Amino acid sequence: MTLDFASDHAAPAHPAVLAAVAEANRGRAPSYGADPWTREAERRLRELLGPRASYVPVFNGTGANLLALSAMTRRWESVLCAEDAHIHTDETAAPEKAGLKLVLTPSPDGRIRPGRLAEHLAHGNRHRAQVAVLSLTQSTELGTCYSVADLRALCAEAHDLGLAVHLDGARLANAAVTLGVSWAELTTAVGVDVVSLGSSKNGGLLGDGVVILDPDAVPGIDYLHKAVGQLPAKTRFISAQLLALLDDDLWRRNADHANHQALRLAAGLAPLDDVALPVPTEANAVFADLAAPVAQQVAREVALTTWRGRGDRRLVRLMTAWDTDPADVDRVVECVARAVEACRPNHAEPVCSSPTAPDAARP
């Protein structure tokens, strides 16, 4: 059986999440966010993130980003983001189709550096889209994490320049575990205005949310919620999942397991000949630079994502999740080791000429 390390979305829903959905399925309940589960989820988020927090359930992470950024910008405004940001690389131009101009800034390890935001502004130039929002991703698309200090510096810099701050938190749980901090310390405390809060990559079944920390940053979001097709009728089933993940810090336990398996995988790959790990493993993603024939051979047994390919090298991504078996991690390491050995130039029987299996989806 193929080992699936292509995405944390490949993991099943956590049993506690499924049980919560089944419990929410008893009887009738008001729709469109008026149900008790959604109200309770908002109450819990206010306990965690502050009394001004409000919760907007949506169908998925792309929808959360699209809704949040649409509410935070006007027709002539744009969004500043990392060159590897999910909103740029993996959302099939959804922001652009919605009329959002994305302005990219270099992020060699996935992170935007403080002190460089002003270089991308053109305030007052009627020929340029006016940057209104800084969008950050935590953890980043390259599996790295912004420190609390860097987040605070970036938010302060953005606010000084008149920008609001959006945080794509599809893997916020993984970052919080890595840094040993709460969600509040990564959001409210540092000055984030709006969060796209992910759960489907951390044991959820489907659905994510927008958490508003500054209501002034998202005028009209109640109307846009419906207008962009992200208002679920039966919100209780999405909110029940979030409540299950919040109960007894299940979200933290799930993310902690995923992160530890990524560290186990990175530790196993690092000593192998001709295998490089170009970015640190700080959450639940491992990026490995492999010779193209090695990557092709590994892809026969392991579902992975080819992030970049140039010349005779391939940068591949391997994702762990809440359910990742340590034995499967070790099997991946063994698979890569075998492929490296088999693809040595002096190997007696080369087995690396077959084309690689189709890449899995990146998100």
Image (cartoon, helix red, strand yellow):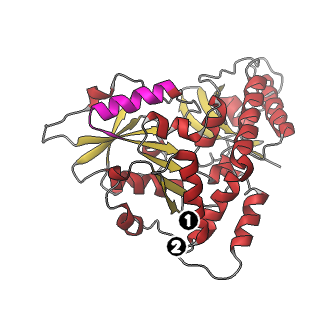
Instruction: List the residue tagged with mark 2.
Output: 34
* Residue 120 picture quarter: top left
Q: Is residue 333 above or below residue 28?
A: above
Q: Position of residue 105 (x, y in %)?
A: 37, 31
Residue 141 appears in view? no
Q: How many marks?
A: 2
Give the Cα separation between the discs numbered 2 and 1: 7 Å
| Membership of 265 in magenta stretch | no
Query: Farthest residue in the right direction?
Result: 327
Q: Position of residue 338 (x, y in %)?
A: 82, 28
Name the dominant secondary structure of the magenta segment. helix
Disc ID at residue 62: none
The residue under the point 25% across, 47% down is 77
Q: Position of residue 134 (x, y in %)?
A: 36, 38
Instruction: List the residue tagged with mark 1.
Output: 39
Mark toward the start of the polypeptide (2 vs 1): 2
Q: Secondary structure at mark 1?
A: helix
- Structural crowding at the residue carrying mark 2, measured as other residues with C-alpha within 10 Å and reported as few (<14), some (14–19) or many (≥20): some
* Residue 97 picture quarter: bottom left
Q: Is residue 298 above or below residue 266?
A: below
237 sits left or right of 320 in the view: left
The region drawn magenta spans 149-164
Q: Are marks 2 and 1 in contact (CB under 8 Å)?
A: yes
Q: Position of residue 61 (x, y in %)?
A: 52, 53
- For the residue pair 225 and 193, the one nearer the viewer reads as 193
The residue under the point 52% across, 56% down is 209
